[in-house]
Amino acid sequence: MLSIKNLHASVEGKEILKGINLEIKAGEVHAIMGPNGSGKSTLSQVLAGNDAFEVTSGEVTLNGDNLLDQETEERAREGIFLAFQYPVEIPGVSNLQFLRTAVNAMRKHKGEEEMNAAEFMKLAKEVSKQVDLDPAFLKRGVNEGFSGGEKKRNEIMQALLLQPKLAILDETDSGLDIDALQVVSNGVNALRAEDRAILMVTHYQRLLNHIVPDYVHVLAGGKIVKSGGRELALELEERGYGWLGIKDEDTSN
Amino acid sequence: MKSAPTLSSAFLHPAGQSLPEPLLALRKQRASALVDMPLPTRKTENWKYSSKYLKLADDMAISLPTEGKGGNSLAVPGYKVVFNNGVMIPEASEYPDLDGIIIQSFSDLDEDDAKAVSLQLGSTLDHDQAQFARVNGARFEDGLFIRLLPGAVLDQPLFVIHETTADDSGSAYPRIYVEAGANSQMTLVEEYISSGDASALVNTVTEFNLADGANITSIRLNMEGENVQHIGATGVLQQRSSRFESHCVGFGGPLRRHDLQVRLEGEGAETKLNGVVVTQGKQHYDNHTSIDHVAAHCNSEETYRNIAADQSHAIFNGRIHIHQDAQKSNADMNNKNLLLSNGAEIDTKPELEIYADDVKCAHGATIGQLDETSVFYLVSRGIGRRQANVLLTMAFINELVQQIPVEAVRETAQARLNDFFEQTFQEA
């Protein structure tokens, strides 16, 4: 489904990704782990199409189509979804209006009828229950005044509504208490499907107790330095990143 | 040295003589005081950013002839008074005869009422700050007089449609005077629209005189066409425990100027001023507001937002003057501005003068652009870039639009805003 070949990317002239290679097939769940500054978030942002990052070489395809040629909105319509590490607060745009606009943009792209306000309200209420978010949040500004956990649940709610082909979860566990982590994980597990891939980017392995990955990759210095199965994450938890020859200033917690 | 420009004498000669005698006399007196009135230049502080947009050719001095048909087709959810080129059109106006409420054109006032009105006209305004209100005083052909007797409540909004029809160049001088008795209430909607291709000058004055406990909501929609220069002044005098709420929505033009002056003269008076301005192309819009806290224990809250696209120019000047005896005043002024292009210009200036020592006075002004992080968030959900820009631009003013208490006005404003978005944001 997703194929990344020798991807290099820079921000403000500084190279962050230095040759990433990764193949993800439909139905698989991959976890990318690594210390701070290893390039995890950069990879997520580059895949979603953030202009602040410049791809200097390499190739990324989604189901054979060149992803890097596409605008962010085109990628989203083709099925890329990024759950943000820091979801943006947008006062003045209601969450409901935002979600309906997004869902209808997708439906229009697929040649489906757009949903009217009443139909969408019904759907949104159902999905908000799935992530344990009070439907009252639908009327508030996008993420406006939401707690960290509420923002993350709102991200997963969007993924459930938009039904992407590839969901990229950027540090979705950060800032979550154990109950919120459970709710978010349930949401992500509900996303697992044969025709969908999930890419989790995380610093800590605790999320992986709840969402069990098929593959784990270690990203360091802008490259994937080791890949393995679920057991690799456990080993990282036990031994830190040091045994792989990686400096990690922030493994406490 | 070049001598300072003065108002052409062509502007001192009103055409219509159909007003009652006391008003004709007032007009004449005001006109004679206007001989050699200096015109604003860029050295005139309160016209610094706007004088270059002002074009007062002699052919603009001609009073635009009134056409009886104006505004007929406009349906409003309330009472309606239609003015064409500053003269009331009774056939197009629909309002009932209500107890305690007098709604009358200046031309229809009897001698006594006309005399009373002539003594009050202009009393709510500082003409040194709103110079062009003087020209209106010398030129008005007609006007609307509203008197709410004590306790009277107008049960529906009163829409005053001011249509300017300019088939040839000329000017119009709409005027409204509202005398709100103690504890009376009304909502007045002023809509300024235009038709015709010739260049026109619309010079308006609206005055509200609020007695103790009166509660007035004023809504002002400025939607005239591309050939109309609009200079308007609104004066508000508030006595004890009165409440005034203003919602101004303005779309740019070759010259757009609105002066809004509020004097809080009675203790416990409250005023709330909201304003939204959008400009595009080479348009201009200048809002000057002034709030005088004269009495103690008064509250004022002011929120203005400007959005400027293309090469347009928006100006906000907000003055708050807290007089020496106005202890326990509470004043809050906030102005935020959004630039949608590198070629657009916004100037904002708060002016605070505080002479009392026990007051709360807060002000804030910002100028920014659309937040790229927010745009990225929206487009990453499949929302098109154009629509993301529209959503975020609307978000900037949505709060103020939603506060307009008359749904039909919100809809009219939204429809015009949609046109603005249509023209401002092109599909990528």
Image (cartoon, grey):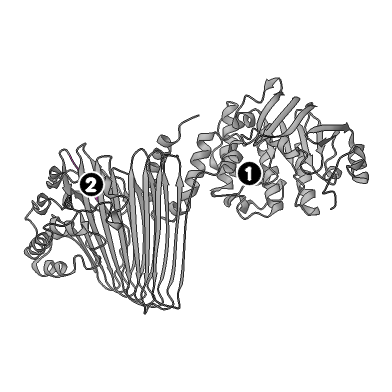
Q: Is B112 situated above or below B190? A: below
> How far is disc 1 from disc 2 in space, using C-alphas?
45 Å
- Is residue B257 shown left or right of residue A49? left
Residue range of the region highlighted in magenta in the rendering: B161-166
Residue that numbered label 2 is attached to: B163
Q: Quick one: SS at disc 1?
A: helix
* Residue that label 1 marks: A124
* Subunit ID for the residue under disc 2: B
Chain bearing mark 1 = A
Instruction: Count every numbered label the image shows and give the total.
Output: 2
Q: Is residue B77 visible?
A: no
Q: Quadrant of the N terminus of chain A?
A: top right
Please, what is the three-letter code of the amino acid marked with disc 2?
Glu
Front residue of A25/A201: it is: A201
Where residue B295 sits, quadrant-wise, is bottom left
Question: How far across and down, in percent of the image, does residue B368 sit?
Answer: 49, 48
Q: Tell me the chief SS of the magenta region.
A: strand
Q: Is residue B244 left or right of residue A18?
A: left
Question: Is residue B285 magenta-colored?
Answer: no
User: From the viewer's perspective, is B71 left or right of B401?
Assistant: left
Does the magenta portion include B164? yes
Front-lying residue, A22 or B211: A22
Instruction: Between residue B123 and residue B2, name the one nearer to us.
Output: B2
Residue A102: x %, y % from top left: 59, 37
Q: Are marks 1 and 2 in contact (CB under 8 Å)?
A: no
Q: Position of residue A138 (x, y in %)?
A: 60, 49
